Image (cartoon, rainbow, N blue to C red):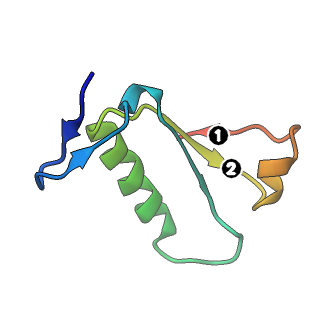
């Protein structure tokens, strides 16, 4: 598959079906953060990215293999 086009006309050079996206938040209260994450996931799905996960327990979630990823 060759490059795909964004609606802005810029090229992307990855295969959306092979991409894995992870999002991590660093605790604390942050009003509106759920909406931001939701819109990121929706936009990625529009472009064909299906493997989107959340990382629990801040940055510890990246290094602790016993903490599971959360599918978004």
Q: Is residue 62 above or below residue 26?
A: above
Callout 1: SS = strand
Q: Are marks 1 and 2 in contact (CB under 8 Å)?
A: yes
Residue at image x 32%, y 40%? 13
Callout 2: SS = strand
Q: Is residue 60 above or below residue 6?
A: below
Of mark 1 and mark 2, the one earlier in the sequence is 2
**Which residue carries the number 1 mark?**
70
User: Seen from this angle, which residue lies furthest top?
Assistant: 1
Q: Position of residue 26 (x, y in %)?
A: 70, 69
Residue at image x 36%, y 44%? 44
* Mark 1 to mark 2 CA distance (whole Å): 6 Å
Front-most of 17 and 42? 17
Q: Position of residue 20 (x, y in %)?
A: 53, 37
| 65 on left or right of 36 | right
**Which residue carries the number 2 mark?**
55
Q: Position of residue 67 (x, y in %)?
A: 82, 42
Q: Which mark is residue 23?
A: none
Q: Neighbour class for label 1 at 10 Å: few (<14), some, many (≥20)?
A: few
Q: Is residue 25 above or below residue 13?
A: below
| 38 on left or right of 56 | left
Residue at image x 46%, y 27%? 18
Front-most of 18 and 40? 18
Q: Neighbour class for label 2 at 10 Å: few (<14), some, many (≥20)?
A: some
Q: Quadrant of the N terminus?
A: top left
Q: Position of residue 56 (x, y in %)?
A: 73, 52
Q: Is residue 72 above or below residue 26?
A: above
């Amino acid at each position: 598959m060759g490059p795909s086009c964004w609606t802005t006309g810029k090229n992307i050079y990855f295969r959306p079906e092979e991409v894995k996206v992870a999002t991590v938040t660093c605790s604390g209260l942050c009003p509106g953060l759920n909406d931001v994450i939701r819109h990121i996931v929706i936009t990625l799905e529009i472009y064909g990215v299906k493997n989107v996960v959340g990382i629990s327990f801040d940055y510890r979630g990246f290094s602790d293999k016993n903490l599971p990823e959360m599918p978004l």
